Each structure stands twice: as structure tokens, then as C-alpha cells.
Image: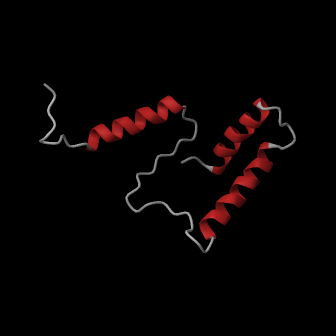
Amino acid sequence: TASVMERARRRWAEMQQQGYETLTVEEVAAQIAERDRLDTTRQAAPLRQAEDAIPLCTDGLTIPDVVARITEHYQAIAQPSPEFQII
């Protein structure tokens, strides 16, 4: 996950590339924060983090950085299956 401001910066950059220049980063952040509030407080299936989720703050990370961190974590906890052997 990323902070509201990080997500706003990313979304704002996308909007700039697409030619949408009407909102400020702060306005985009406010919209994201409101959407998060609505998603987490709705009556039907409110958005919640899974109990077994492993949080990863992606603020300031590139996509390859995130993939590397996920891969490192997986390799640290993965147990090889007895049925699977590399020959």
C-alpha cells in the first residue's frame, strides 16, 4: 500500500501525462481520502485488510523495487514442497 499523498502524486502524474491539468495534488489527495473513507465505512462488504496480509509500504518505491521486496519476503518464508524437486 501507499500513503494517500503518495497515491495522489502517482495519480496526479498520470493525469498530467493524459492532459488533465485541472486539479492540484492536494485536491487529488482529498478525493482519494474520501474514496478510502467511503470504501472502509460502507455497510456492504467494507474494504478491510486481510488478517494474514503482510503490509508493504510502497511510498517512494518503483514497481521493480516493490517486486524485489515481495520476492525477497517470499523467498525468506517459502518452504520447498517435498513433492517438488529441481533436477
Q: Nearer the viewer, residue 16 or 73?
A: 16
Which residue of the protein is positioned furthest toward the top in this rendering? 87
Q: Nearer the viewer, residue 3 or 47?
A: 47
Q: How is the image coloured?
A: secondary structure
Task: Kindly identify the residue that appears in the image at 74 percent across and 39 percent down.
Answer: 12
Q: Look at 17% across and 42% down and name the residue there.
A: 81
Q: Residue 83, position in %: x, y?
A: 13, 41
Residue at image position (44%, 60%) is: 50
Q: Quadrant of residue 37?
A: bottom right
Q: Is residue 72 above or below residue 40?
A: above
Q: In the rendered image, which quarter is residue 52 located in?
A: bottom left
Q: Position of residue 21 (x, y in %)?
A: 85, 37
Number of marks in the rendered image: 0
Q: Residue furthest right?
A: 22
Which residue in the rendered view is the most extreme toward the bottom? Answer: 43
Relative to 64, 79 lies left or right: left
- For residue 67, side relative to residue 62 (left or right): left
In what quadrant of the picture does the C terminus appear? top left
**28 w.r.t. 14: above or below:** below
- Expressed as whole percent of the image width and height from the top left, the position of residue 55 reads 45, 51
Q: Residue at x 41, y 36 (%)?
A: 69
| Residue 28: x %, y % from top left | 76, 48
